[in-house]
Amino acid sequence: MVVYLASEKCPFTGSVFAVQGGAVALMDGWTAAGTAATEGPWESAELTGRLDAWA
């Protein structure tokens, strides 16, 4: 997640994410606007593809 947020390709600014285990959620106030989950560790390319779809 840190690698993704620090990359030049990351379209998010001022957004809040909740990260727990293999789940990443984009927050909208106190509600998750979208959730992506994986069984094992995230690969950078996989996480990028999932989060870019939310932008």
Image (cartoon, rainbow, N blue to C red):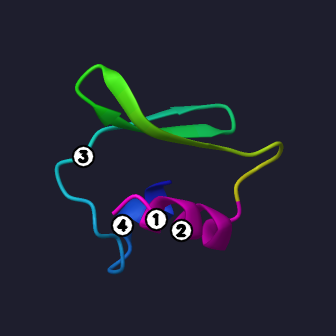
The residues bearing labels 4 and 2 have C-alpha atoms spaced at a distance of 12 Å
Q: Which residue is mark 1?
A: 53
Instruction: Kindly identify the amino acid type of the residue bearing the numbered disc 1.
Output: Ala
Q: Is residue 19 left or right of residue 38?
A: left
Q: Position of residue 45 (x, y in %)?
A: 63, 73
Residue topped by disc 4: 6
Name the secondary structure under disc 4.
helix
Tag 4 and tag 3, C-beta contact below 8 Å: no
- The quadrant of the picture occupied by the C terminus is bottom left
Secondary structure found at label 2: helix
Does the stretch in magenta take in 47?
yes
Mark-to-mark CA distance, 2 and 1: 9 Å
Residue that numbered label 2 is attached to: 48
Label 1 and label 4: CA atoms lie apart by 17 Å
Name the element at disc 1: loop
Q: Which residues are magenta?
A: 43-55
